Image: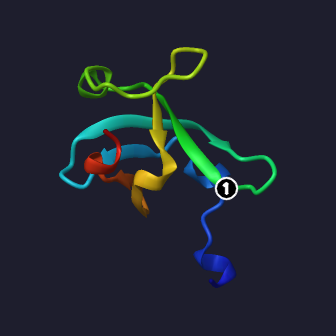
Amino acid sequence: MAEEDKNYSKSLLGKTVVTKTGKRFGEVGNISFEVRTGELMQIILKNPTAYTEGMDLERDDNNQLLIPYSSVIAIGDFVVVSEEDIA
């Protein structure tokens, strides 16, 4: 993968998280990762929408909603996630 193709986690902060059908989830507040490997594990949402609050998503110790990073299917102006891979 070319250097310019890599997405650094810092560049994701503040991006709007949407599904591939256009449902808005909120914004990327932070990202958790595995310290030993650097693997991105979960997106921690900030400003979650009412739709997202109604979902049965995992929460962290601070009661913030978590989205598995494995559900991310595209990153550009938005972070696009596959809703089927979340539930």
Q: Residue furthest bottom?
A: 2
Q: Quadrant of residue 56?
A: top left
Which kind of residue does numbered mark 1 sit on? Glu
Residue picked out by circle 1: 39
Residue in the foreground of this view, choosing between 67 and 6: 67
- Against 60, residue 34 (above or below) is below
User: In the image as oriented, which residue stretches furthest toward the top?
Assistant: 62
> In this rendering, would 20 be left or right of 71?
left
In this view, the residue in front, 3 or 70, is 70
x and y percent of residue 49 in the render? 31, 26
* Residue drawn at point x = 43 percent, y = 62 percent: 76
Q: Residues within 10 Å of mark 1 (few under 14, many from 20)?
A: few
Residue 72 visible somewhere in the drawing: yes
Q: Position of residue 33 (x, y in %)?
A: 68, 45
75 left or right, relative to 4: left
Quadrant for residue 48, please give it: top left
Quadrant of the rendering where the C terminus is positioned: top left
Query: In the rendered image, is residue 13 in sight?
Result: no
> Of helix, strand and loop, which one carries label 1?
loop
- Relative horizontal placement of residue 3, taking residue 79 as reference (left or right): right
Q: Position of residue 72 (x, y in %)?
A: 42, 55
Q: What residue sits 63% from the left and 78% below the top? A: 4
- Residue at 38%, 28% (x, y): give it: 57
